[in-house]
Amino acid sequence: MRPDQDTKGTTPSASDVWDLLAPATQDRTGFTAGFLATVDPDEQPRVRAVILRDADPSAATVSFATDVRSAKIRDIQLRPAVELALYDPDCMLQLRLSGTADIVADPEICAKRWADLAPHTRERFEQIENFAWVAISVTSCDWLDLAAEPPRRFRMTVAPGQHETREIVP
Ligand SMILES: Cc1cc2nc3c(=O)[nH]c(=O)nc-3n(C[C@H](O)[C@H](O)[C@H](O)COP(=O)(O)O)c2cc1C
């Protein structure tokens, strides 16, 4: 499914989610920035924008870079359940990904991701020791198509080997 297609008469699948997210990690699209929700130590919700830097269909993960000193790292260490909401105004589609965040410890992966960052982005971390790569294992996606009239909403399982979509109302 292309971003400019609406879901009239069709049921989106998990592969449509990856087809929309993968290009957003290479070029700027409406899905390049999303809003990550965590729960803080006082059990308060915390939401902030992050840049989607990787979307891997085979592992069913989406990833972002952050600073180990940031509050979201503390939140994830305490409670790894997160949501990432993304909205592309061009295709009027909201994707809300639910999953479990993992602060990647593998030094090889971190070194590669660090090397992939633009120099001005690396500077913000001051040193590589402050860099963290966070991979969210996506288990489900809430797909809301506002381009359809009336809007259509689907709940889909996204985890590897589990693909199921059902339409929900409202
Ligand atoms: C468009 C946009 C993109 C952002 N991308 C990131 C990002 O990829 N990683 C990140 O750690 N912070 C990013 N930020 C900053 C966060 O939204 C947030 O202010 C910061 O990470 C501190 O969040 P925390 O204290 O909740 O951890 C971005 C902000 C904006 C407005």
Image (tube, rainbow, N blue to C red):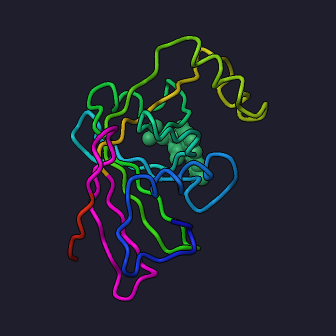
The residue lying at 40 percent from left, 36 percent from top is 136
Residue 113, above or below 28:
above
Asked whether residue 131 is drawn in magenta, I would say: no
Residue lying furthest right in this view? Answer: 119
Q: Who is closer to the viewer here, 50 or 97?
A: 97
Residue lying furthest top in this view? Answer: 107
The image position of residue 33, as x and y in percent, is: 56, 53
Give the quadrant of residue 99. top left
Q: Which residues are magenta?
A: 141-164
Direction from residue 36 to residue 116 in the image, left or right:
right
The residue lying at 26 percent from left, 33 percent from top is 41
Ligand 1 shows up in the quarter that is: top right
The image position of residue 160, as x and y in percent, is: 34, 38
Image quadrant where one finds the C terminus: bottom left
Q: Who is closer to the viewer here, 132 or 88?
A: 88
The image position of residue 117, as x and y in percent, is: 71, 31
The image position of residue 35, as x and y in percent, is: 45, 52
Direction from residue 135 to residue 120 in the image, left or right:
right
